[in-house]
Image (cartoon, rainbow, N blue to C red):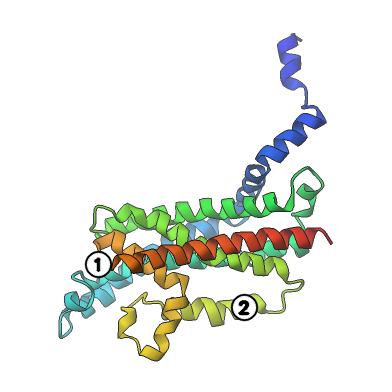
Amino acid sequence: MTDAARTRLAAHAPEVSAAKARRWGSFYFAEHVLRSMRAYLVTIVVTSVGNPLLYLFSMGVGLASIVDRSAGGAHGVFGGVGYLAFAAPALLVSSAVMTSANEMMFPVMDGFKWRRFYYGPHVTPLVPGQLAAGHIMAVGVRLTLQCLVFFLIMLAFGAAPGPWAWLLVPIGVFAGMAFGAPLMAYSAHIESENFQFSMIQRFIVMPLFLFSGTFYPLATMPVGMQWIGWISPLWHGNELGRMASYGLSEPGWLVAVHVLYLGALGAVGIWWARRNYAKRMGK
């Protein structure tokens, strides 16, 4: 065997492996999480393709045709576009938010309690903050691919008429992370899952989906219920998505509010998650 072949077969020295883990640990763990998603890859593919097809077909062929023919004219109500173009960007953002919620609840509890897959990497030079960051990065990759598939299907249905509609992909990921990061921090905090996640799905995720201006403008809701949209990351993501998709007109200050609100939620959520990972794994 040549010297070059022996060199290729030799393992890294422990100090070299430790240095690489300290430098690239978040990426290593993100790869691990992405590979673990292969266990439910069929579900991911079916939901990523089936949901947009189902939503857009029902909206485009079914509900949109009825709404657009209704008295008063839908184009006046929905900012100069048909109902399909109005609802489709919000459906993409909603899909990203709900996927992020699912990935930040049971898988996080799985890592700490059921299969405890966070603790193996923790005996290496990887620190809890890198584990949290790696999990977030992996979910970000999944959301990016899912939003891209949704966007391409929107193009096939003619539901993304604007030249900047491609921005729906990063906007969907942005909104998904703004909702998912604080939820990840909460999941890392609780010791037992006593139906808290089911409650979150029923009493937080689903109401936000229904009352965040996804299917109709928030201004058409009773004033007493509009606050649900104002505090919802989904509504802020929906409005940004509509601006990108068909040029919804918004004042500059409100655009700033949308971006800053989502950015603040995501940043606080990531900080809180890293802190809770460190506390939980330090016990």
SS for dot 1: loop
Residue drawn at (28%, 56%) of the image: 156
Residue drawn at (28%, 70%) of the image: 86
**x, y percent for residue 217:** 31, 78
- Between 157 and 42, the one nearer to me in the picture: 157
User: What residue did someone put label 2 on?
Assistant: 198
Left or right of 144? Residue 190 is: right
Tell me, yes or no, if residue 103 can be seen here: no
Question: How many numbered circles does the render carry?
Answer: 2
Quick one: label 2, few (<14), some, or many (20+) residues within 10 Å? few
Left or right of 76? Residue 215 is: right
Q: Earlier in the sequence, mark 2 or mark 1?
A: 2
Find residue 249 and name its label: 1
| Image quadrant in which you'd find residue 5 | top right
Residue drawn at (30%, 85%) of the image: 220
Tell me, yes or no, if residue 139 can be seen here: yes
SS for dot 2: helix
